[in-house]
Amino acid sequence: MNLLDFARGAVMKWSIAIFLFGMLWRLFGMLLLRRTHDYSEPRVHAAGLGALRSIIRRSWPRREFQARTAYGVTVSYVFHIGLAIIVFGFVPHILFIRNLVGVGWSGLPGGIIYFCAVITLVALVMAIVRRLTHPVLKLLSNFDDYFSWFVTAAPVVTGLLAAGHYGGRYEDLLAVHILSFELLLIWFPFGKLMHSVLLFLARGQTGAVYGRRGAST
Amino acid sequence: MSKDDSIGESLRKQGISRRAFMKFCAATASLLALPPGMAAVMAETLSRARRPSVIYLSYQECTGCGESLTRSFSPTLENLMFNVMSLDYYETLQAAAGTAAEAARKTAMKENWGKYLLVVDGAVPVGHDGAYCTIAGESAVDILTEAAKGAAAVVSVGTCAAFGGIPHANPDPTGAVAVSRIVKDKPVVNVSGCPPVPEVITGVLAHYLTFGSIPELDHLGRPKVFFGETIHDRCYRRPFYDEGKFAKTFDDEGARNGWCLFELGCKGPVTYNACPTVKWNQGTSYPIQSGHGCLGCSEPDFWDKGSFYQALSTGTWSGGAVLGAAAVAGAAIGVGAAIVSRRRHAHSEKEKQS
Amino acid sequence: MSSDINTIHPLETEGARLSIKKPALRYDRQGDMSDGQRVEAAMRTFVREFGATSAIYLESCIHCGMCAEACHYYVQTNDPRYTPVRKLEPFKQAYKREAGPFAFFYRLFNLKPRVTADELQKWQELIYDSCTMCGRCTLICPMGIDIARLVGQARHGMFQAGLVPHELWAVAERAEREGSPLGATPKVFKDRIDWLSDENAVEIPVDRDVADILVTMSSIEIMKYPQAIVATARVLNALGEKWTIRLDGYEATNFGMLSGNSQWQKDLSMKMINAAVRCKAKLLILPECGHAYGAMRWDGANVYGKPLPFEVLHISEFLARNLGNGRLKVRNVPKSVTFHDPCQIARRGGATQAPRQVLGKLGVDLHEMTPSGDGNWCCGGGGGVVTIHRADELRYKVFQIKMKQVDDSGAEMLVMSCSNCRQTFDDGQAHFKWDKTAHSLLELVADNLVQ
């Protein structure tokens, strides 16, 4: 068995298993904690609407905050959109998803994907440089921030290397690429990458609270 | 024709012109990607060389490799057999049978001890002391061990001989192994493929016969000249892969337009072979050209790498039960953690009140 | 009246801002607990606080640092210590150890070391002096984390650990013992009402057995802006309402909440709730006070444990309602006005439009600040910060944002609907010798009533 078979076989199975295991552990452990009922008389009765509005609106800072946050927001947007295009637009990735969950769609030309990957990588580097130099981010950052960055950037780098046949035989590069993604899957439930799920819960919660108060959500 | 004739002599005796011989050498040289001047060297060497003895052993195989070999058009097998080498033992083609055949092999081995070229196709079963494949009462592994001792070099023809191939595939009931697992002290060239491209087999033989040495090999013991690049990198359908144009079924518009077969499970990106360049049946076509994805047959364990129709970027694992169990365990521990937290909360609430 | 409070923590009632007098020696650690006991008490409280809501918030932070850009303390100092979510660091640590889904492992492998008393002491300044719980961070957070709410919860732990800033603890204790943080005891209040009603020839009903409306006041108004009482009376009398002030439940400020003592918060809120229930009030009017609005309008029912049997309105909402339905009439005020949104009423309370409707009826030329409404900057005095002497320097620094906003609006008059904001403005005005004076929306209406 070579490295590629290892990556496509046992490691993939167990990384997905750990991903599911961790996701459910963390979500249940959080969601089943005590909840208190809010007895106050709502100003606006559609709390669900407030939650939904908040989930959408928080994707972009309010106008008064835009000037001070433009750089960080732009960089994050670039790599988030870039990652989305790479993950959901590259045919081999779509086939991976289809094989796993049964839903597929048509993809984009390889050239566009490679271009996006380079842009994404540049934005990721900008993000980490900012994290390492901005006084606030430097102070806030911990192992989770740096490791989560690493497991996000690694598949992009290894994917580009595999596509360009740089640094080894293709099957080995592909195996390393798949393994790097599997590392991401394993880390996902235990670190900040979980924000891709939690953002709906946290935004929704705040949206519901301030929505029923009639305040901005 | 006497065995001791040089190749040049034997050709002249058969009335083959110098011109025809040069053509053969040029074709073989170009196939091996040798520099242009090498054709002349080859002609010179071959015409002076004494035809070396070749012993061809067949074990756990389907004779597909032999079928392939007989379809080589440049150089043709006949050419090699009659002009270039002395094929002293090959069960499939030889007229002799039984004790006579075995005697011929033993004689050839004795006469050419240390000099003959040993060609093997098929895997070698080592389970139950080699009982799964015996010839004239001797096990394959014993015959091979003995024959290899006197060989100058060994050529494993086909994926079974090179890597174990189909006999070695799960569950491998006979303990089938590659030739290189048995022969450790002689140079072994793996000419993999199921079957290998005919010209790749004859080309390797011609190389050995010309230079008396084996060609440069990759990390799996395959000649780099034929196995240096992936099918995908040399595939004429590659531009469609780059453009994101894929056939999704074997009879859709994409398939008719000749688009990339990646989605249909083509293993071209991780398969090293000469199919797209040398092609088959006198350069007529190769699997992808005829509309089917590459199976990856020249790679080790190709039979056990998931379905031939499953895309390369998907997993080859099975066992949804593990995932189900992981999900259930995760949920259970999560619920447990929440209960513990709630208990700790209730406990502190009680403490507060007391 | 407990005399020892007056000896130990004498009130400062003369200056532009009300608090206790600047302590010669600060006692920012209360009680005689050992360090271990302090940590234990803080932890126990945190564990009690951590429900699913806080858990989701604490798990969600991606350390993007955007909250710093919304915080007046960071914006004015560029000191990363003031990054709002970092103010929660010890509490995040406690959560991970004590209540999170992986808490068991954190404890087993000591992945997050236990918070120390010294760390908590160090964080006191971040949790109290440099956070008004104004909620701009909540508004900017791309994950929607309600950081201000979490700071409120963190204060609960700090209180139990006996780690509250000297002044805030002192006024909170006074509120618990006397019913008012600033010496507005029932007796003082009653004297003021008698004097005000004589002075201004206005009827102020006290302790009616039955009334439709219960009016509550902020002790800042009672002690510093008594005209607010007169203004409220004028408005309610003009409407012919059957209303009352009750001496068993008039203090709307809640220093139990601000200091972090949930029992005291409950005690203070229950006084008003019980008073309203006793006089069968259909409506409880909250004064011009920001946190009083949050404490009663949104937390009142939860403290009570069931829905309140009466409606709760901020005075600006009450004015907007009665000006809107025409029961109350006002003269046109031909002035340009800018309005300061009190955080707890607008951004965190949702009553953002009410004061604007009132100003509309007054016919003023409204010059909105930039930003305004729910995005408006905090005055820097909320969350009890204005009482803390050692926080003054920082408070003046962040107040400069407000001065610039007001100056840039170009309005002649500055109006707000929170007496705590108002005293912060008064104090800032005195400190910077600024030419802008803060006015009350209620008083502006009362002064221009058409009978």
Image (cartoon, coloured by chain):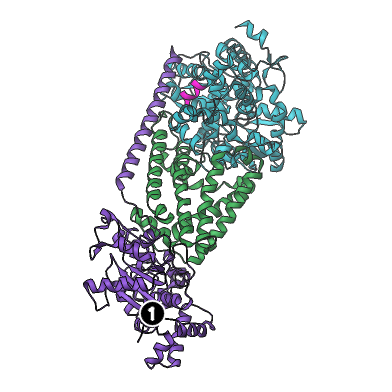
Which residue occupies 27% across, 72% down? B103
- Using a 10 Å C-alpha cutoff, classify the residue at mark 1 as few (fewer than 14 neighbours), some (14 to 19) or many (20 or more): many
Q: Is residue C47 magenta?
A: yes
From the top left corner, tell me how far across and down residue B251 is, in percent.
Answer: 30, 72
Seen in the image, is C327 located left or right of residue A125? left
The amino acid on which the numbered mark 1 sits, given as a three-letter code, is: Met
Q: Nearer the viewer, residue C156 or B50?
A: B50
- Which chain gets the green colouring? A
Q: Can you see residue C451?
A: no
Seen in the image, is C434 located left or right of residue A173? right
From the top left corner, tell me how far across and down residue A146 is, in percent.
Answer: 56, 43
- Which chain gets the purple colouring? B
Q: Image quadrant of residue C426? A: top right
Which shade is chain C?
cyan
Q: Which residue carries the number 1 mark?
A: B85
Q: Nearer the viewer, residue C451 or C295?
A: C295
Which quarter of the rendered picture does the N terminus of chain B lie within?
bottom left
From the top left corner, tell me how far across and down residue B210 is, in percent.
Answer: 46, 78
The residue stretch that appears in magenta:
C43-49
Q: Nearer the viewer, residue A135 or B152?
A: B152
Q: Secondary structure at mark 1?
A: loop
From the top left corner, tell me how far across and down residue B63 is, in percent.
Answer: 28, 71
Q: Can you see residue B211?
A: yes
Disc tally is 1
Q: Is residue B96 magenta?
A: no
Per the picture, the main secondary structure of the magenta-coloured stretch is helix
Q: Label 1 lies in what chain?
A: B
Which quarter of the rendered picture does the C terminus of chain B lie within?
top left
Seen in the image, is A200 located left or right of residue B55? right
Q: Image quadrant of residue C336? A: top right
Q: Is residue C362 above or below residue A74?
A: above
Q: Nearer the viewer, residue C333 or A60?
A: A60
